Amino acid sequence: MFLDRHDAGVRLADEMRGRGGAEDVVVLGLPRGGVPVAYEVAQTLGAPLDVIVVRKLGVPYQPELGFGAVGEGGVVVVNRDVVRLANLSQAEMSAVEERERAEVERRARRFRGHRPPTDLTGRTVIVVDDGVATGGTARAACQVARARGASRVVLAVPVGARETVESLREDADEVICLDVPDRLYAIGFWYHDFSQTTDEQVVELLRRAASRHEVAAGSVLHGLAEDVQVDAGPVRLPGRLVVPPKAAGVVVFVHGSGSSRHSPRNRYVATVLNHAGLGTLLFDLLTAQEEIDRGNVFDIGLLAGRLVQVTGWVGRQSRLAGLPIGYFGASTGAAAALWAAAEPGSEIAAIVSRGGRPDLAEPRLGEVRAPTLLIVGGRDTVVLGLNRAAQERLRCESSLQVIPGATHLFEEPGALETVAHLACDWFTDQFTLHAA
């Protein structure tokens, strides 16, 4: 089972990691539920993300029963067996098609805003959904993509009905499905959290992906970008190290639940920092086995000890020699960052906490010397109170920035972008002072 759509996307992206060799790859998510899954795939493959909007054509007196689907570009898919069984007339079918075609156009404008559809001509298109049951929508999406000029169409889903997956191979050049149960029951059965994805979430994910892709495409990033194994005492922790040319410093991301590499929020912030000329290290603070025990997530001593060892590893890398080091911590990772920065001899130049729990580092707060920025959502009232109390305990330079209207995960439109720019300014200023 998948935890949620983001977890499904991470797993699907890992499966597809070696399949993104072609530069001309476009990832298309089926809104709404397919977009969070597609977002993870696009980030892993370094490909642009767009939506492909299709609508089911429902039988007039039984709308849950679909006789086909309509998509962008004038593509219509009709199931003749259902049409015959439902005894539908051409007039009835045309009326439904006209209504749903208008809805396709409305939703496409709603999701994309002013951005034009991504050109698919001659490109490999990966169509992603959160699962397939009957496959009508996925089939229409594949045909729409091909009608818009795709040279190759790949359908990728976390879970799908066995017969449907096999039948979809007629419409897609390749079908990738992580789990093909003999009895699907319902797609939601395979997710712990299958809550509805909202229009606002789709718009935000598309905006974030577009921003990230523009940054990557227009960046002068021709420095180092590689997967690494970080020695941290008895364990080796996988990570992703990016160092732009003439980097002003390097920021180590500290994620409370262990995995920074798979956090879409951390990855977005890291890209913004890279574009500003800052190096980043996203790494897994806990091993996969350790993360199963939730007690480890709140073991600040363990997390901080790991972080100290990772910081030592960073300092020993010749390509990072002399660069100031900062910490970007989230949740309990922020507490670990503060705890580690309070160690005797620590030379951490700056700390940023995003929705952090600095209260969990309370015994060490007075010993932190690194300038610290605390960023909290205005609607994250409990954590905001904890941050205000923790700031009073800090003796170092500190600032508390409250993002109006934002909740704990900063999922609201523009909230994470604000976090990224605040962090970027803080690290840039503090690294400059530290170097001086």
Image (spheres, rainbow, N blue to C red):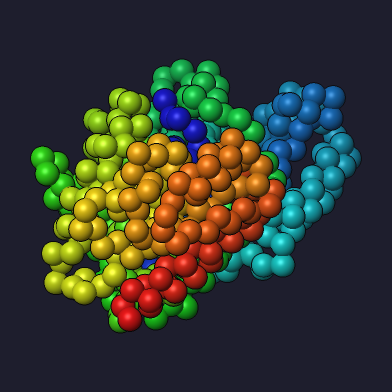
Displayed quadrant of residue 58: top right
Displayed quadrant of residue 258: top left
264 and 29: which is toward the camera:
264
Q: Name the residue located 55 percent from the left edge and 22 percent from the top edge.
A: 186
Q: Name the residue located 16 percent from the left edge and 47 percent from the top edge.
A: 232
* As drawn, 245 above or below 11: below
* As drawn, 131 above or below 377: above
Question: Can residue 350 be seen?
Answer: yes
Image quadrant in which the C terminus is located: bottom left
Image quadrant in which the N terminus is located: top left
Left or right of 85, for residue 388: left
Left or right of 412, for residue 292: left
Q: Name the residue located 50 percent from the left edge and 49 percent from the top edge.
A: 391
Left or right of 229, for residue 274: right
Question: Can residue 259 be seen?
Answer: no
Image x and y of residue 105, in percent:
77, 55
158 and 386: which is toward the camera:
386
Image x and y of residue 49, in percent:
53, 58
* As drawn, 293 above or below 286: above
Image x and y of residue 33, in percent:
59, 39
